[in-house]
Image (cartoon, grey):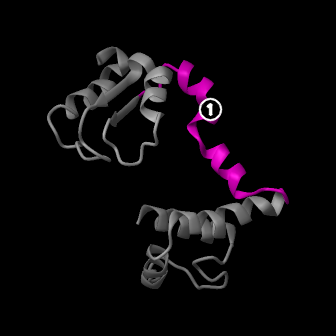
Amino acid sequence: MMATNLASIADVLTGSNYLVAADAPLGPTSSLGNVFVQGNRLSFEQFLDGLYVPWFRRSEPGYDRARAIAEGDLASIETFLRWDSRLGLMTNADDIILAPGELAWFERVFAQRAVIFPKGGHCGNGAERRFVPKLAAFFTDGWAGR
């Protein structure tokens, strides 16, 4: 659903005509039901290939999927993530979106600014007692409050 929201907004703003017709009369009360039905049938890869890559290819003819993936990888901004003390990480060791080696990478890059819970899946512990105080402490005291 989130990918559909992002794709439809990007489509309208860029005039890409991917999910929303470029000449669609859009207003504050326009129904977008059909857009979301269609968008929810598409995979992330289809959004990448059908909307994201073509948009960048407009200004850079050689732009391709491999480059998009490489530029979207957190490793491409590792130095920034490692040294900006305003940034931190909270995740779960059993998050299904983590690729092999990512947890160890997070621990190396974020060090003391990483809070890694053993269980919780993908965003599954947001309302648990162990999570809320750590999140509140970050917004109150930054990583010093961990």
Residue type highlighted by circle 1: Ile
Residue visible at 39% across and 16% down? 112
Q: Quadrant of the N terminus?
A: bottom left
Q: Which residue is mark 1?
A: 77
Does the segment drawn in magenta span residue 87?
A: yes
Helix, strand or loop for disc 1: helix
Horizontal side of 144 relative to 20 (left or right) equals: left
Horizontal side of 26 relative to 118 (left or right) equals: right
Q: Main secondary structure of the magenta part?
A: helix
Does the segment drawn in magenta span residue 53?
A: no
Residue visible at 65% across and 62% down? 52
Horizontal side of 62 relative to 113 (left or right) equals: right
Outermost residue to the left: 129
Residue 107 rendering spot, x and y as whole percentages: 43, 23
Residue visible at 46% across and 42% down? 99
Tag 1: Cα neighbours inside 10 Å, few (<14), some, or many (≥20)? few
Give the image quarter of residue 13.
Answer: bottom right
Residue 113 rendering spot, x and y as whole percentages: 40, 21
Residue 79 rendering spot, x and y as whole percentages: 62, 23
The residue stretch that appears in magenta = 60-88
Q: Quadrant of the C terminus?
A: top left
Front position in the image: 102 or 38: 102
Residue 78 rendering spot, x and y as whole percentages: 59, 28
98 w.r.t. 146: above or below: below
Residue visible at 59% across and 41% down? 73
40 w.r.t. 21: above or below: above
Outermost residue to the top: 144
Q: How many marks?
A: 1
Outermost residue to the front: 100
